[in-house]
Image: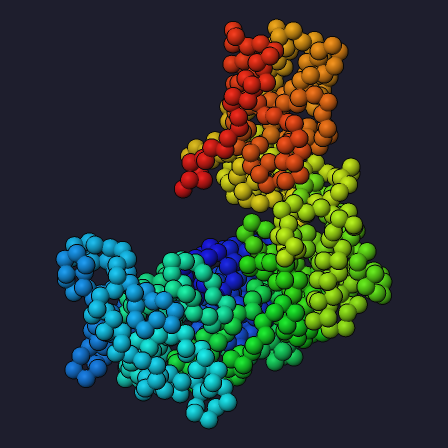
Amino acid sequence: MTAFDNSPLARYLPPIPQGMAATWIESRSLKGKFLLDPFAASADLIVEAARSGSSIIVAANNPIARLLIEISASPPTTTEAHQVLSALAATRIRDERLELHIRALYDSTCPNCQAQIQIQAFLWEREASHPFARLLHCPHCGESGEFPATESDRQNASRFSTGGLHYARALERVASINDPDRSHVEEALNVYPPRAVYALLTIINKLDALNISPREEKILAALLLHTFDRGNTLWAYPVARERPRQLTVPPVYGENNLWLALENAADAWSAPSPALQITHWPELPSSEGGICLFEGRIRDLAGQIEKTDLAGILMAFPRPNQAYWALSALWAGWLWGHTAVEHFKSVLRRRRFDWGWHTTALQAALENLPPTLPNGLPILGLVGEAEPGFIGAALIAATKAGFYLENIELRSDEKLAQIHWQIGQLPTPSGTDNLTISEAIQSVARTYLLERGEPCGYLQLHTAILSALALQNLFQLAETPLDCYNQTQQAIQAVLNFRHGFLRFGGSEKSIEVGQWWLSETDTASTPLADRVEIAVARHLIHNPGCSLEEVESAVCGEFPGLLRPSKDVILECLESYGEKSEAGWQLREVDAPSKRRAELASMVKLISGLGENLGFSIHLPESDSDPCLWLKDELPRYAFYVSASAVLGKFLIEHPSPPATCLIVIPGGRANLVMFKLQHDPYLRQIADEGWQFVKYRHIRQLADSSILSADSLDAQLELDPLTYAETQLRMF
């Protein structure tokens, strides 16, 4: 599975790329040992850990999370899923099969051949009394797409209304009429259109009539779960991948055909994977590849877990999500009745979901663990959809709960943070007041930017600041997690400004998170990270012909770990600039062989000096690779040609920010994309380049040298005739 896939309920769950658990388990030698997941936020992560040879104990208070884990650990075959669906389809509504009855709810006519067909979805505007359009594919004539709703479609929709027997039944399965939470259940139910409520409760009412095995009941529950989600109005149209977090009906939404959703669910859940052993606490699985479910909160499990020889904690942090939590309570009641949600439906009452609240909730869950666990126990926490508030909540909560931070790696382009802690003694804070925190923030932010050597987004800078505060245990200066979160955010905002030596490119007065951050004084800054990545990629291709993209990425990220981890985009740009892909893997381009580039570099310097002499300039040859070939007039530099075989720009632009002459960086045409990429993503370099620098390709210098009409007077105009452009590569087009 990859992030943002189309698996059931994926739009509510942490987008964690495949391989996170397996890599960590291998690196920490945790195969055959017991792990703990205190949140049960990602069934895929849990199952991957078990399939990697560890057994994992999971605290799962949400009944829907438990179902996701159980069905992911033992997925049905295609045959099993369709057999269960067939059994459901064959039940009767009076003298009619259930399948035909539900299908008839979505009958319409083809706009082309007029045949009676099943629509895929009706489209509605919020608060409208009838659908305005339909999505369809006609199996008879092949007509497909979006078409206006017919009068018959509108009349069929008007047959269903809020209220009535099915609506009451939908409420009753979750909360009885005297239940104080019933009003909250009604709020969740309001995101379902009346036709969907009728269809779903008609199906649910047939569950008790089925004579199927416990295994088949579990499979059917999974099919229905997928269908429950497809039935609500949280499917914005035409947005394909919106991730709902609130019970808010979008302006335009799709009302999906729920029998088609059931059929799709049978395929979505089917997988050839062998079943994993699943037990329920306190029964433990074997130590190699099993899952133990604890039905409750981690605070209730923490006191018992010390009896187990735990070797690590693996968790995906849950994100505050009213939609998922409220709908989970609704769905669990529909599947198993109101007793199944008795200990979970309190989520329906929650009205606060800000990051300060979430920090408190995470800390309350995690603080139960350290007293029961041995020092040195490794912990991996994954933050999907990473943003400053989410990372702040995770770092502050874990630190105040007693976790000792080892390191953090941020994939900013994938919005994923990997945070490594261990159980251990936290250091005594080095100060006692907010001034200490402000000074630490200023120092850390400056150090990080200097080490990076280039501007970065607020997410990276914020994460660097918070990780340093965690390492110094400065979060303990605030009494509560909420105070700590709020005070830290206020301190960061107070420090990141020009008065304290920070610049922002493309910022906004409305949000500190907009734009890229840099320093007003950069004399001691490292070489820009993108330049160092370019060198690392080229070196890897030279020494490892036939390598894969994954091998290049692993090697480069190993060279720049943690918060310096480069984006996949910059690695790919460098790879496409220096390499070519074949069936054997990535090879260094023949023209980029070091010996050929050195010879071409010398030839280009010779060509430029000869061209200058022909135009009447005196020539001063470069003494090193970073020096220019100078053209002088009246002993004053008029043109400075910096000849390079690479797109490493920092050594030219940063070391010579105010050139006394027209400065040109001469590069191979194959570096044009990489140069354009760097200038686009580094506003500091772009600002310098815009102050009088030009970029010229080798081929254009050759053309100028061959020109019989070029003169000193026409040179400036001629130099601009072949500007750099970004050419989309085949690899990025698909």
Give the farthest residue toward the front. Answer: 713
What coloring was used for the rendering?
A: rainbow
**Foreground of the two, 543 or 406:** 406
**Which residue occupies 73% across, 73% down?**
480
**Foreground of the two, 439 or 158:** 158
**Left or right of residue 286: residue 307:** right
**Which residue occupies 66% across, 39% down?**
684
Counting from the top left corner in percent of width and height, residue 310 is at 63, 69
Counting from the top left corner in percent of width and height, residue 668 is at 55, 23
Q: Quadrant of residue 210?
A: bottom left
**Which residue occupies 56% across, 77% down?**
351
* Quarter of the image with the C terminus in it: top left
Counting from the top left corner in percent of width and height, residue 43 is at 49, 66
- Is the residue 667 above or below the residue 115 in the image? above
Q: How many marks?
A: 0
Q: Quadrant of residue 602?
A: top right
Counting from the top left corner in percent of width and height, residue 485 is at 70, 66
**Which residue occupies 59% across, 36% down?**
678
The reply to whether residue 89 is in sight is no
* Quarter of the image with the N terminus in it: bottom left
- Is the residue 56 above or below the residue 590 in the image? below
**Left or right of residue 475: residue 340:** left
**Left or right of residue 691: residue 600:** left
- Is the residue 369 above or below the residue 32 in the image? below
The reply to whether residue 254 is in sight is yes
**Left or right of residue 526: residue 39:** left
